[in-house]
């Protein structure tokens, strides 16, 4: 890994890969000044890997080195301390430190950067400070952030059956406060953490953490004292600059306020600068948006799961041009609206953008010139901005202006008009950055060359002093060749020795007296002269001072951006709004989606609905559109049909259409009228909760129970194959009871799509007035079937299980036997009897059906039994029949 140790500060600790001796800890190691300081830092940050900047390397010692070396894939070396043993060490070059920090964070470690902050003076210990403590929720470094994602640090405080939540994004510095009923293990907390993309949770170190929470994000226990109310209030007051907290409305959420105190304390420790100009505290109202649970997120494929490829709804919708737009789109998907006016306002924007193709194209072009303004501002606030970041702010100021003009040119919706007004760079900011910065900018300020000539008189002077001396040095070679007569003499420069005059050995006797020897090479000698030295000092000194001046000017520019943070992030938010609107319009046009009509009714009517992702996968014209009607007369649709017919797709497409409509998007249908839903509940597919030790059936029942408890009359409930994970009798009974409950419970009676392969359930429509039957049309041709994927009224009369088994490639012999058994079973006991709306359900909760002995008798393989076995079975069955 390490190629050179030359640049390592030699007076500190020299690492030597050595034969393993007893590894010792920090305390036992010797007492060099640096180790003494290091120990102090380590004791302040015992839970972090401390990266100590020594020269050109970041080094780790002792236990930290032992943890980090394998994670980073670097060699574990050591420094010997005589008989005491060896102190383990490892290090990484400072240029590559970011990628190594990423690896440590990914491995769940916290990282403290102990960096050089003073000037490096030979022979003296450089001043070092902990400049950053990075943990999953406290990352502001551009290189470590995914542009499309937000990761929040969320403090949770549970007390007396309530949980206070303070969710903080250190980049945008939005702090959201709210409280929920329940404990830390409440599903509401888990759903909220998923919505918030929480990557780190701060909790009192005295609180036991439910396993479920620990699985969601890195948990960081903090001393209970940081959640203390008066301290928290003081912290919030200081951070906001408010004299009193009354105006913030935080008194309504006292637990969340205490959690906010913990977040702010944690920011201090992480050395994240809290800017009064940026910090925004919002109290989240209890309603106003739709809470999505983990199942619904997964079932509707909202987001790609970590490390998973393939499409998600977010990917499908993401025709945004800026990272701010992508993040807003994600946030909208996380939190669909429940108020008609909010949804309508968003839909209006799409409509005007669809009507004006040219206008939309201009807007898209303008947005394309915008970089991640929000994060650029954050980096200026954190004093991490590079010259190129400032250049990007400059370009964004220009792009804001073009975006504003493009937005104004469109006949605007209220939302677009408002965004266009806010799409404004602070007065003069773009011009002043343009005047200050060069067009092409260096990566680091220390490279020099970021400031435009003519922008600063001091800098110009330093630069011209340097360049005069450089001109002198350039001319020196010619002059010295003439003076000495050494034609192969050359003037050169290297970083270690500076400027020199090089003379090949063959000419050595012609070297004049005023040359003093500096370095001997294989074939040449290098010299300096007093004159050369003097000019060298001017050149180097001028360069050093010029760079210092450049850094000063850049820091000043970054500070001006930071002061204008509020205005710039407002503009960035406006950009995001415009970007999402144009993205949704673009997708609506490409995918031929329509504007849904949104109202307060409890109905749902979709004509020609499609599943957005399945349609995309199948390609144009291959997806069969379907209708849905759920109104006051028809609350529940029981959908029957064989496996693979398209039941689950139909259910998911309906939920996706509602969700899309409520984020304010057009929808994949010919027509849609949607009464706003307060929640969408989905229970689809069977899966084991292996880590939780629950069986498929248990998971299914727990999820169903949660829906029955939480749904309201305004919810949309999607249930797929309830009761599959248990025996047929249990399964049908439970499925029927669930439908009856959804139908009859006064607080429910909610819009429900219920898919099942138990065709026995179709009889429910006869007894429950608001239940309708639907089935997936299947064409049967002997032992073959074709799926039409068309949903039609009426119930299926059979399961076609054996047909599907054939499609799946089960061997012919097995199929023949299965058909025999099926026929025998159907003769032996009338389970369901044949379906159809008018048929009686012979199996119901009050009528448990034929005695199990009958079923067993019917399924006996008499031919395959010996006479003795048959007699035994007969006596066993007689015994059971008589009990
Ligand atoms: P089920 O839930 O009935 O077992 P699925 O909904 O999983 O069936 O659908 C099975 C497959 O059939 C899907 O993967 C899809 O490729 C196809 N399919 C489903 N619905 C449609 C449709 N409306 N149009 C075209 N293909 C469909």
Image (cartoon, rainbow, N blue to C red):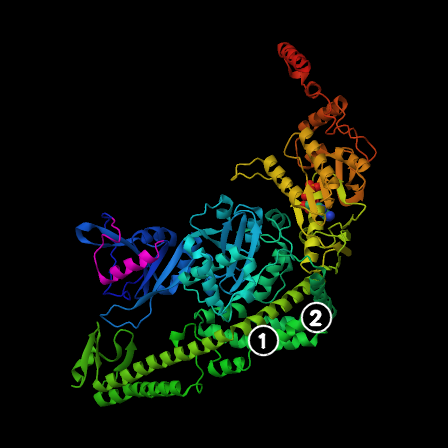
Query: Is there any visible trace of residue 140 in the rendered image?
Result: no
Above or below 385: residue 70: above
The image shows residue 864 at horizontal and vertical percentages of 65, 16
Write down the residue under mark 2. Answer: 414
| Residue lying at 45% horizontally and 74% vertically, measured from the top left | 387
Locate residue 310 relative to residue 595 in the image: left or right.
Answer: left
Of all residues, the one furthest to the right in this rendering is 838
| Residue lying at 43% horizontally and 75% vertically, measured from the top left | 442
Density class for disc 1 (Cα within 10 Å; few <14, some 14-19, many ≥20) is: many
The image shows residue 808 at horizontal and vertical percentages of 67, 37
Ligand 1 located in image quadrant: top right
Membership of 375 in magenta stretch = no
- Which of label 2 and label 1 is nearer to you? 2
The image shows residue 412 at horizontal and vertical percentages of 71, 72
Membership of 25 in magenta stretch = yes
Instruction: Tell me the magenta residue range.
Output: 23-46
Above or below 779: residue 422: below
Q: Which of the 4 image quadrants contains residue 792?
A: top right
The image shows residue 656 at horizontal and vertical percentages of 68, 52
Write down the residue under mark 1. Answer: 399
In space, the residues marked 2 and 1 are separated at their CA atoms by 22 Å
Q: Nearer the viewer, residue 514 or 222?
A: 222
Q: Which of the 4 image quadrants contains residue 479?
A: bottom left
């Amino acid at each position: 890994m390490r190629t050179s140790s030359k640049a390592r500060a030699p007076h500190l600790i020299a690492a030597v890969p050595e034969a393993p001796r007893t590894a010792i800890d920090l305390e036992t190691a010797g007492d060099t000044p640096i180790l003494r300081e290091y120990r102090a830092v380590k004791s302040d940050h015992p839970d972090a890997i401390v990266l100590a900047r020594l020269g050109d390397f970041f080094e780790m010692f002792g236990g930290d080195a032992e943890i980090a070396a394998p994670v980073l894939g670097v060699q574990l070396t050591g420094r010997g301390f005589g008989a005491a043993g060896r102190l383990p060490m490892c290090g990484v070059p400072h240029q590559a430190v970011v990628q190594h920090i990423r690896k440590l964070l990914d491995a769940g470690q916290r990282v403290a950067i102990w960096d050089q902050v003073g000037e490096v003076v030979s022979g003296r210990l450089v001043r070092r400070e902990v400049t950053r403590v990075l943990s999953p929720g406290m990352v502001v470094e551009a290189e470590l952030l995914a542009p499309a994602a937000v990761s929040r640090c969320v403090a949770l405080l549970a007390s007396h059956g309530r949980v206070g939540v303070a969710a903080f994004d250190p980049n945008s510095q939005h702090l959201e406060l709210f409280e929920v009923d329940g404990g830390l293990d409440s599903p509401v907390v888990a759903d909220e953490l998923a919505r918030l993309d929480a990557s780190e949770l701060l909790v009192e170190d005295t609180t036991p953490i439910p396993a479920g929470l620990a699985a969601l994000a890195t948990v960081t226990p903090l001393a209970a004292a940081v959640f203390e109310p008066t301290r928290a209030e003081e912290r919030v007051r200081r951070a906001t600059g408010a004299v009193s907290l009354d105006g913030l409305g935080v008194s309504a959420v006292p637990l969340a306020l205490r959690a906010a105190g913990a977040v702010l304390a944690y920011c201090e420790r992480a050395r994240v600068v809290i800017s009064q100009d940026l910090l925004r505290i919002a109290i989240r109202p209890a309603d106003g948006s739709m809470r999505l649970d983990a199942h619904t997120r997964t079932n509707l494929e909202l987001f790609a799961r970590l490390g998973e490829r393939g499409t998600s709804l977010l990917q499908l919708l993401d025709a945004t041009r800026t990272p701010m737009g992508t993040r807003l789109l994600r946030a909208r998907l996380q939190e669909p609206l429940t108020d008609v006016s909010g949804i309508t306002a968003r839909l209006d924007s799409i409509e005007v953008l669809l009507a004006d193709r040219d206008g939309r194209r201009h807007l898209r072009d303008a947005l394309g010139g915008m970089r991640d303004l929000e994060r650029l501002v954050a980096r200026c606030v954190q004093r991490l901005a590079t010259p190129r970041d400032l250049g990007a702010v400059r370009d964004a100021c220009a792009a804001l202006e073009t975006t504003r003009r493009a937005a104004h040119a469109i006949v605007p919706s209220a939302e677009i008009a408002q965004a266009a007004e806010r799409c404004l760079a602070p007065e003069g900011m773009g011009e002043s950055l343009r005047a200050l910065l060069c067009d092409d900018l260096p990566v680091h300020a220390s490279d020099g060359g970021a400031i435009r000539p003519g922008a600063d008189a001091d800098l110009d002077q330093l630069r011209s002093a340097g360049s005069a001396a450089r001109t002198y040095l350039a001319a020196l070679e010619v002059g010295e060749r003439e003076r000495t007569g050494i034609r192969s003499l050359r003037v050169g420069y290297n970083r270690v020795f500076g400027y020199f005059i090089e003379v090949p050995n063959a000419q050595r006797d012609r070297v004049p007296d005023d040359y003093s020897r500096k370095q001997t090479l294989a074939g040449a000698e290098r010299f300096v002269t007093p004159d050369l030295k003097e000019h060298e000092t001017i050149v180097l000194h001028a360069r050093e001072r010029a760079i210092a001046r450049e850094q000063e000017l850049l820091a000043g520019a970054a500070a001006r951006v930071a002061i204008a943070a509020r205005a710039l992030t407002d503009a960035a938010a406006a950009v995001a709004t415009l970007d999402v609107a144009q993205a949704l319009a673009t997708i609506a046009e490409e995918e031929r989606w329509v504007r849904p009509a949104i109202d307060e009714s409890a109905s749902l009517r979709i004509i020609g609905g499609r599943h957005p992702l399945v349609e995309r996968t199948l390609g144009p014209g291959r997806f069969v559109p379907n209708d849905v009607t759920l109104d006051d007369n028809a609350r529940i649709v029981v959908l029957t049909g064989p496996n693979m017919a398209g039941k689950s797709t139909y259910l998911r497409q309906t939920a996706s259409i509602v969700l899309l409509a409520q984020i304010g998007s057009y929808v994949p249908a010919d027509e849609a009228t949607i009464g706003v839903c307060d929640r969408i509940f989905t229970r689809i597919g069977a899966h084991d909760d292996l880590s939780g030790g629950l069986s498929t059936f248990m998971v299914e029942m727990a999820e169903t129970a949660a829906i029955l408890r939480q749904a309201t009359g305004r919810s949309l409930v999607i249930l797929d194959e309830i009761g599959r994970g248990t025996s047929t009798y249990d399964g049908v009974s439970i499925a029927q009871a669930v439908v009856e409950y959804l139908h009859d419970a006064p607080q429910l009676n909610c819009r429900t799509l219920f898919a099942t392969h138990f065709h026995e359930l179709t009889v429910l429509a006869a007894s429950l007035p608001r239940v309708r039957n639907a089935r997936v049309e299947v064409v049967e041709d002997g032992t073959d079937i074709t799926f039409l994927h068309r949903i039609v009224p009426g119930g299926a009369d059979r399961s076609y299980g054996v047909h599907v088994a054939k499609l799946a490639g089960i061997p012919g012999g097995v199929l023949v036997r299965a058909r025999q058994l099926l026929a025998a079973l159907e003769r032996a006991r009338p389970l369901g009897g044949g379906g159809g709306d008018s048929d009686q359900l012979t199996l119901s909760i009050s009528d448990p059906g034929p005695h199990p002995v009958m079923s067993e008798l019917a399924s006996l393989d008499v031919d395959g039994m010996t006479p003795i076995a048959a007699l035994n079975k007969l006596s066993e069955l007689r015994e059971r029949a008589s009990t």
